Amino acid sequence: MDPILEVVCLLLGFIGWVMVGIAIPNRYWKVSTDDGNVIITSNIYENLWMSCATDSTGVHNCREFPSLLALNGYIQASRALMIAAVVFGSIGLVATLVGVQCSKAAGEDMVLKGRIVGVGGVLFFLQGLCTMISVSWYAFNITQDFFNPFYPGIKYELGEGLYIGWCSAVLALTGGSCLTCACKLGTSEKQPYPYQPRGRVYSGVAPSRSQAATSYGQDAYV
């Protein structure tokens, strides 16, 4: 595998991992819509952990969700998936740092390094997959309530935290896929075999011309 490609994929996974850490505490996963409202007295925005409100004077007030079990199922699942994404990304980052060719942590065994990099690529891919499922599931519920004309509660729009999560997922999926595929291609290359001549190999001193002629003359006449 090309060392430059390894470093590029590592940077993609690292940036995706950092963006997951930015998306999780971001407060603007969903923001109350102003569509159809003539007078706006306050704005409400939420994430996976708390709900906040700001009034026309600019005063912010936030409260954490009081009970985990009282939350909707998709919020609980999104929390678990985002935490799993952080864990996968952390282990994948360490594995890729150990296995890259420019690192001396795993010695000079390129086969072992390639396998470690492949494991890191799979973990980066799982990080991006968990992030993508979590963010997309959360956004689906927002849009479902927004376009439901019979929904009685407050309608929300997509917040910036979701877009950060989508960008993180794309980067992690790209970096993990490239690392995994490159590692697979590298292990499938066949090593050249040493040349082995067919037939019998005789060793010894070649007979001289006189000996060859004598033996020919004795065998020619029977």
Image (spheres, helix red, strand yellow):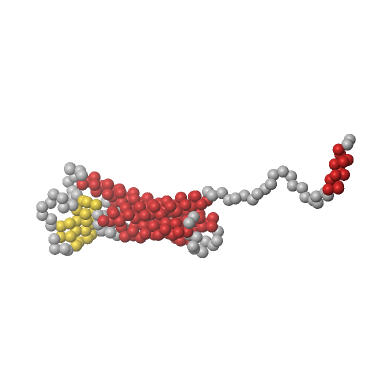
Residue 32 location (% of width, % of height): 19, 53
Residue drawn at 46 percent across, 61 percent down: 97
- Relative to the observer, which residue lies in front, 116 or 202? 202
Q: Is residue 191 above or below residue 62?
A: above
Q: Which residue is most to the left? A: 38
Q: What is the tally of numbered marks visible in this picture?
A: 0
Residue drawn at 74 percent across, 45 percent down: 200
Question: Relative to residue 65, is residue 115 drawn left or right?
Answer: right
Where, quadrant-wise, is the C terminus in this rendering? top right
Report whether residue 134 is seen.
yes
Quarter of the figure with residue 50? bottom left
Report whether residue 81 is seen.
no
Residue drawn at 40 percent across, 52 percent down: 125
Residue 188 location (% of width, % of height): 53, 48
Residue drawn at 81 percent across, 51 percent down: 205
Quarter of the figure with residue 150? top left
Residue 39 location (% of width, % of height): 10, 54
Q: Which residue is most to the top? A: 222
Quarter of the figure with residue 18? bottom left
Q: Is residue 212 above or below residue 123?
A: above
- Relative to the observer, which residue lies in front, 150 or 202? 202
Question: Relative to residue 75, is residue 173 drawn left or right?
Answer: right
- Relative to the observer, which residue lies in front, 86 or 221? 221
Question: Relative to residue 189, is residue 61 drawn left or right?
Answer: left
